[in-house]
Image: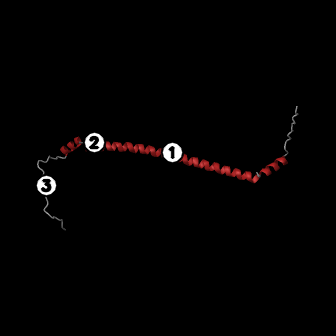
Amino acid sequence: MRRRKYIRHRKQSILEKKRAVKKIGITRNFRISLLGIIICLIVLDVAQTSTVSTKGYEIHQFQKEVKVLEQENSGLDFKIAQHKSMHKIQEKIDTLRMKYVEKAIYFTPQENTVAQR
């Protein structure tokens, strides 16, 4: 049978940890720069989210306004159709004291008629 060799791992000292970090290239300045970049990205994300939500609210308000105007427009179309109906025209003939024409007389101009000053 083979014997397994157990390797004891000892804890690294602080100096060894610092050296290992320096080998990787993560210095204090790099970490500060990375933290600054992350903070900037978070701020930009919050600003963009705020802008998008504001635009969404404005779009919702405009959609409400469009619905109101469409309803008003359909109401006006209905009123126009009412006033153009033959029944309304017949009523207005009586109120304006109009009479039916028995015989229409048309004007026929002479040849080469031109308006002069």
Looking at the rendering, in which quadrant would you find the N terminus? top right
Q: Is residue 6 above or below residue 101?
A: above
Q: How is the image coloured?
A: secondary structure
Q: Element type at marker 1?
A: helix
Q: Residue at x 51, y 45 (%)?
A: 57
Q: Amino acid at mark 2?
A: Gln
Q: Earlier in the sequence, mark 1 or mark 2?
A: 1
Q: Gap between marks 1 and 3, in whole Å?
A: 64 Å
Give the label on residue 100, or none: none
Q: Amino acid at mark 1?
A: Tyr
Instruction: Tell me residue 5's x, y (percent).
Output: 87, 36
Q: Earlier in the sequence, mark 3 or mark 2?
A: 2
Residue of label 1: 57
Q: Is residue 110 left or right of residue 80?
A: left
Q: Amino acid at mark 3?
A: Tyr
Residues under numbered marks 1 and 2 in contact, where contact means CB atoms less than 8 Å apart: no
Q: Is residue 107 left or right of residue 39?
A: left
Which residue occupies the foreground of this view, 116 or 26? 26
Residue of label 2: 82
Q: Residue at x 55, y 47 (%)?
A: 52
Which residue occupies the foreground of this view, 26 or 116? 26
Q: Element type at marker 3?
A: loop
Q: Gap between marks 1 and 2, in whole Å?
A: 38 Å
Instruction: Tell me residue 59's x, y (percent).
Output: 48, 46
Q: Residue at x 19, y 47 (%)?
A: 96
Residue of label 3: 106
Q: Earlier in the sequence, mark 1 or mark 3?
A: 1
Residues under numbered marks 1 and 3 in contact, where contact means CB atoms less than 8 Å apart: no
Question: Which label lies toward us, 3 or 2?
Answer: 3
